[in-house]
């Protein structure tokens, strides 16, 4: 089986733009040199935090999605570690309503794992 990656089309570009602006905010904060010249340690730490967390956020945003492969299903979230589920643990796959967004129902595939369920809301519509 070939590996298939399904990624959110709107969420990724929005997050990339937000974190690019975040990075530029940190760069412009440190560029004039006032913070460095005055040895404002809080400002230096804040600027370095902005500059380093921006590219990390862009990298996490570009990895979002669901990867379906021969070994199982891997869900790559923005704020959590990857959740890998082998095919042997999946009992069935159903499409059910998992959420309400803007007053409209969100239907998405749900992996049934014995007594537990794992909704794939990234594939929802």
Image (cartoon, helix red, strand yellow):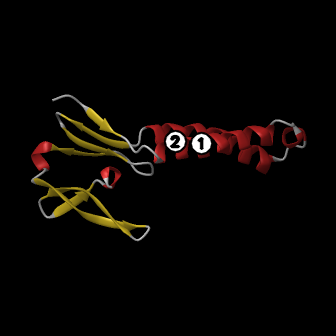
Q: Position of residue 85 (x, y in %)?
A: 21, 46
Q: Position of residue 96 (x, y in %)?
A: 22, 63
> Image point 70% across, 39% down: which residue?
24
Above or below residue 32? Residue 113 is below
Residue 42 x/y as whole percent: 77, 50
In the picture, measured across the screen, residue 39 lies left or right of residue 70, that is: right
- Marks 2 and 1 sit apart, C-alpha to C-alpha, by 6 Å
Determine whether label 2 and label 1 are within 8 Å by CB.
Answer: yes
Q: Is residue 1 left or right of residue 106?
A: left
- On the image, the x and y values in percent for residue 38 come to 90, 43
> In terms of image quadrants, where is residue 57?
top right
State the residue lying farthest toward the front: 104
Looking at the image, residue 40 sits to the left or right of residue 113; the answer is: right
User: Which residue is painted at 79% across and 48% down in the image?
Assistant: 43
Q: Badge 1 local density, few (<14 within 10 Å), some, or many (20+)?
A: few
**Quadrant position of residue 111:** bottom left
Counting the numbered discs, the total is 2
73 above or below 125? above
Q: Secondary structure at mark 1?
A: helix
Q: Between residue 84 and residue 10, name the one nearer to us.
A: 10
Question: Secondary structure beneath disc 2?
Answer: helix
Quarter the C terminus occupies: bottom left
Crowd tier of the residue under label 2, counting other residues whose Cα lies within 10 Å: few below 14, some 14–19, many 20 or above: some
Residue on which disc 1 sits: 17
Q: Residue placed at 28% from the left, 53% from the top? A: 120
Which label sits on residue 115? Answer: none
Residue 13 bears which disc, if any?
2
Q: Residue furthest bottom?
A: 103
Residue nearest the viewer, comparing 53 with 111 = 111
């Amino acid at each position: 089986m070939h590996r298939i990656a399904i990624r959110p089309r709107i969420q990724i570009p929005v997050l990339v733009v937000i974190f690019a602006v975040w990075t530029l905010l940190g760069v412009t904060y440190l560029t004039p040199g006032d913070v460095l010249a005055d040895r404002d340690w809080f400002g230096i730490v804040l600027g370095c935090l902005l500059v380093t967390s921006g590219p990390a956020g862009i990298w996490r945003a570009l990895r979002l999605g669901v990867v379906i492969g021969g070994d199982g299903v891997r869900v790559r979230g923005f704020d959590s570690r990857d959740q890998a589920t082998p095919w042997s643990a999946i009992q069935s796959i159903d499409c059910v309503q998992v959420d309400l967004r803007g007053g409209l129902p969100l239907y998405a595939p749900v992996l049934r794992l014995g007594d537990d369920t794992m909704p794939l809301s990234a594939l929802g519509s």
